[in-house]
Amino acid sequence: MAAFAQDGTAEADVKFPWSLRFEPSGDFEYPSTTYDVPFETYLDTTIPEGSKLFNIYATDAPTELGGTE
């Protein structure tokens, strides 16, 4: 997760994250009771390529040791 920058280029100064937190971007929402097709179908047909699905936050160390996000 830390080896590449946001644009996909190799990161020169890699800082391995202690933990990652994925937060939904809120750009997409699907009905929770729709089971007429596999969920992958919704992903393929309703989310444009390059869309932001999650905000990702990294913590650099355990919080008990002073880690910050």
Image: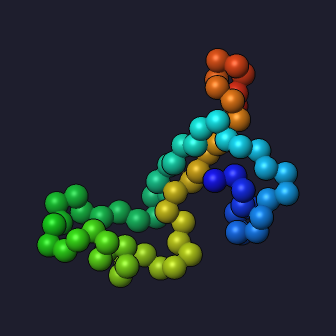
Against 40, residue 31 (above or below) is above
Residue 69 visible somewhere in the drawing: no
Q: Where is the C terminus found, in terms of image quarters?
A: top right
Task: Identify the residue at horizontal 47%, vertical 54% (top origin).
Answer: 24
Residue 23 pos. (x, y %): 50, 49
Q: How many numbered discs, if any?
A: 0
Residue 59 pos. (x, y %): 65, 36
Residue 53 pos. (x, y %): 49, 62
Task: Identify the residue at horizontal 37%, vertical 73% (top origin).
Answer: 43
Instruction: Classify residue 46 as left or right of residue 5.
Output: left
Tell which of 30 and 60 is nearer to you: 60
Quadrant for residue 40, please give it.
bottom left
Instruction: Classify residue 62 as left or right of residue 30.
Output: right
Against 49, residue 30 (above or below) is above
Residue 12 visible somewhere in the drawing: yes
Seen as rendered, the residue at the extreme right is: 12
Task: Identify the residue at horizontal 41%, vertical 65% (top origin).
Answer: 28
Quadrant for residue 57, please give it.
top right
Task: Identify the residue at horizontal 53%, vertical 72% (top origin).
Answer: 51
Quadrant for residue 34, please give it.
bottom left
